Amino acid sequence: MIYLDNSATTAPDEDVLRTFTEASRTYYGNPASLHQAGTRADQLLQNARKQVARLAGDDESEVVFTSGGTESNNLAILGYAKKYRYRGNHIITTEIEHDSVRKACRSLEEDGFEVDWLAVDEQGVISLDELKRKLRPDTILVSIMHVNNEIGSVQPLAQCAQIIRERSRAIFHSDCVQSAGKLALPFPRYADAITLSGHKIHGLKGTGCLLAKPSRLPEAISYGGGQEDGLRSGTVNVAGAAAFAKAFRLATAEPSADHMRNWTAAMHDGLKNEPRLRILSSPDGAPHIFSMAFKGLTGEVAVNYFQENGIYVSTSSACSSKSSRTSHVIEAVGVPEEYRKGAVRISFGRSNSAADAERVIEVTKEFLEMTKKGMKQHDME
Amino acid sequence: MIWSELLIRYGEMSLKGRNRKVFIQKLSENIRRALRGLETVKLKAERDRMFIYASPEELEQAVHLLKDVAGIQSYSPIAQCESTVESIRSTALGVFEHEETLGRTFKVEVKRTDKSFPLVTGELQKEIGGTILRAHPDLKVDVRKPDILLHIDIRETGAFLSARIYKGAAGMPVGSNGRSLLMLSGGIDSPAAGYLMMKRGVMVEAIHFASPPYTSEKAQAKVEELARKLSVYGGSIKLHIIPFTEIQQAIVKQVPENVSITSTRRLMLRIADQVRQEIGALAIVTGESLGQVASQTLESFTAINAVTNTPILRPLIATDKLEIIDIAKKIGTYETSIQPYEDCCTIFTPASPKTKPRLDKVEYYESFIDFAPLIEEAVKNRQIIECTSESNPDGDFSDLL
């Protein structure tokens, strides 16, 4: 089987697994304990923390280990809102964020915060002018994802940062779950805090972190023993933290994602003239995500067809693939009605090759050919 | 990476006259030690600067490792190319590929030692500046206070370009200003004091007082960890661990509680002085800061200091606790220092120590015991541990991470 659903999750790297099992076996002590088993675990934890900060480009950065993307995004959105509430109650985000940002912002709206949702164009990119217009002196938080998980659009975070800094004192957070290991991260130069997840970079599920500039930490949103500087109570998952540090190191050591860009470019080329197929990703988007939609068909049918042909792909996003509602991202980029239910996402990871992209082109064409029968004439073009 | 070498600018040691050679030699040694893990590194020391040559990957690592080496004012990665306008142009573009340009300003500065170069300074500046502007329209020129200063040095041997200046640790090369003995407790202050002296070129050994079973092995491990962390700045630190239980018990028995701390400090100093003599150090360094605790008042210093004529260096004397914490955080010892293990000073602390102990009275109380043999014994039975950054018995987990 060819696995092309790496934006949903990736196969863990053997070395990461080894780190996890060895750390679990040898350093099982509670890092908060005073005895040697505890202090050894704590040393490993602190080393992992230092490694993540160093790899992110600033040794002084704060690293809060969490259970992954969703928890980090929640901590950032709710935690910064809580911390800076005294400064204002205005928050800016986009219409295409992951649900862990979107729904956290929704809950803040219910609590009386005012949230502005930036629209995106057909390529899935926000407008800098709109950001400029929406920023206010009482804006306390701007959260803009780096790479969209469904269509791979890349936001101009450098320009966003400049605009935000010129016009407000807002904290700038970015969900970088999909861009880590593929694009240069906006931290610490542009974003004040970013969200990272282990299992999207060939690490383990249940691992990840919120990375923040020194003295730019949110307030806690859960309570307990005060671990992770009080920001993430609960006995620390030391082996998970070590495994994340390892996965992050391996991901940053990769030369670049240029080879993946060649593969997505080949798919753009090979599929751009197909009737009844609409490519949702932009050629300027992330190198590893390619999203397309079939006219008048559901993504599920396509996923099944690909599977029969030895390829794992997903509908727009794994989180929403089992619900029948159209994804908010697909709606936001203005996909015509008859294509909306037919989105399919192909996402590359470490084990893929150019041949996999070629195979996708073939199978897509076959699928289009096969579904031609039974289509009404006016649906054919 | 397009860098071919690192240029290192000396700290204030470049002001020194005849000792300069010694300073440069010490600095070379310390840099070699800091970069010992890198295989392709070559050093070339000149009178007023130093060059490091290595593979591009190792140069990048060296940039990271040099920031802790005392005696370096600043350093810059250098890209070398042929002295032709064309190759300078393409190298300059290469340099700017690594620079953030959005909303920033720049300036081109040319130094033309090789007067045979076809363009004069101003012409080349204009030429290269124009090239960069065309490639990076988001950049602006600012000749007064540019964010990025592209320096082009044209010599007979080629053109040398640099755009970045990293700040060094400044100070003087460790070892260029003699040797001292640091009283290392395990708290926040003493490592900071040690660091400040090392930054002034002093080679440090450390002394620690252990009172088992009142103090635990963890407390000693913590001090060893601190010494290892300090050793990053000076290569290696010898740690002398003094068995102090017997002396402390004798003090508790003989000296009234409210001046027992004064006597304890006096005896520590006597022992430290003896060790200092044995190792050929010239001074004793402490982390004392005026007024911080009862034993750090001027009256206490007077009573404690009376046991020796050796210079006692107190680099933190006029700093506040918060300033000390900042230093400790910067040098990476803070996290270790705040671990909660008892040390020998905290376990026998009286409820209300005298802040103005009188020397004559303290001397009188102590006169009932002959401490000399006890001191002799303690010094003789001391344990000496060599602490270097790689001697960490716990490993650095690099196999796991």
Image (tube, rainbow, N blue to C red):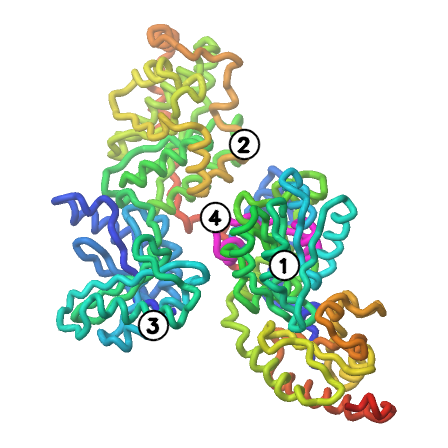
Q: Residues within 10 Å of mark 1 (few under 14, many from 20)?
A: many
Residue bearing the label numbered 3: B131
User: What x and y, as percent, mark residue B107?
Assistant: 31, 61
The C terminus of chain B: image quadrant: bottom right
Between the C-alphas of marks 4 and 2, the distance is 19 Å
Is the Cβ of the residue at disc 3 closer than 8 Å to that at disc 1? no
Q: Nearer the viewer, residue B165 or B340?
A: B165
- Which amino acid, by three-letter code, is at mark 3? Thr
Q: Regarding mark 2 in the picture, which secondary structure is present there? A: loop
Q: Residues within 10 Å of mark 2 (few under 14, many from 20)?
A: some
User: Looking at the picture, does residue A327 appear above or below residue A168?
Assistant: below
Is the Cβ of the residue at disc 4 closer than 8 Å to that at disc 3? no
Q: Which residues are magenta?
A: A53-76
User: Looking at the picture, does residue B332 appear above or below residue B180?
Assistant: below
Pointers 2 and 1 within a single chain: no
**Res B393 label:** 4
Letter of the chain that mark 4 sits on in the rendering:
B
Residue bearing the label numbered 1: A144
User: What x and y, as percent, mark residue B399?
Assistant: 52, 59
Residue B313 within the magenta-colored segment of the rendering: no
Residue bearing the label numbered 2: B341
Q: Quadrant of residue B384?
A: top left
Q: Residues within 10 Å of mark 3 (few under 14, many from 20)?
A: some
Inspect this view and state whether residue B144 appears.
yes
Instruction: For marks 2 and 1, give the one nearer the viewer.
Output: 1
Q: Nearer the viewer, residue A343 or A228?
A: A343
Pointers 3 and 1 within a single chain: no
